[in-house]
Amino acid sequence: MTVVRAKRVRAVAWWSLVVVAAFNALSAVGGGIGMVTADGLSMPKSMLADTPFSTFTIPGLILALVVGGTQSAAVWLLLARRRSALLWSAVAGFGMLIWIVTEIGFIHAMMYAQVIYLVTGLVQLILIFSLLGIVSWLPRLNPSRIRPAPPRAQGA
């Protein structure tokens, strides 16, 4: 693979990761807010029967703050090209998968939206593994293009 083509493939993988993480972030934050404010977004409360929750408030907060928060942090770090971007993207991707698998286990059903988010979480992790060089079919990310976090000022 030529150097130019390798750079182009890495750039496509990087921006694809940004898009997937942004989609997951917006969906999780929006869905969580909707679950809290619209009492479960018209989902029947019977879905909560085998869960430790009696309302959709706590699951909605977890979805918005934990899943959406890690995805949002991943997007920000990716756009800022921070060294920790891929780490936080992996945390967010695994978080998405844990959320979906747990949700499926609690409600004992699988809906099309869960399949979408299961796939986006997996795609997110595949892109990260690819950029890290763990998957051999995509060239490794050049770490010199990623900026370290700015040094912190020492307090008095």
Image (tube, helix red, strand yellow):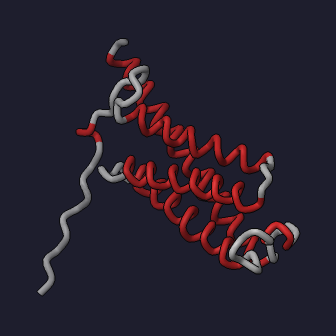
Nearer to the camera, 45 or 64 = 45
- At horizontal 76% and vertical 69% (from top left) the residue drawn is 50
- Residue situated furthest front in the rendering: 50
- At horizontal 52% and vertical 60% (from top left) the residue drawn is 72
Q: In screen coordinates, is 1 left or right of 12?
A: left
- At horizontal 23% and vertical 62% (from top left) the residue drawn is 150
Q: In screen coordinates, is 142 left or right of 40?
A: left
- Residue situated furthest bottom in the rendering: 156
What quarter of the picture does the C terminus occupy?
bottom left
Q: Position of residue 127 (x, y in %)?
A: 48, 36
Count the marks: how many?
0
The correct choice, above or below, for 106 with respect to 53 in the image is above
Q: In screen coordinates, is 106 left or right of 25?
A: right
Q: Position of residue 65 (x, y in %)?
A: 56, 71
Q: Position of residue 91 (x, y in %)?
A: 45, 54
The correct choice, above or below, for 138 with respect to 38 in the image is above
Q: In screen coordinates, is 41 left or right of 15?
A: right
Nearer to the camera, 30 or 134 = 134
Displayed quadrant of residue 143:
top left
- At horizontal 19% and vertical 70% (from top left) the residue drawn is 152
Q: Position of residue 145 (x, y in %)?
A: 28, 40
What quarter of the picture does the N terminus occupy?
top left
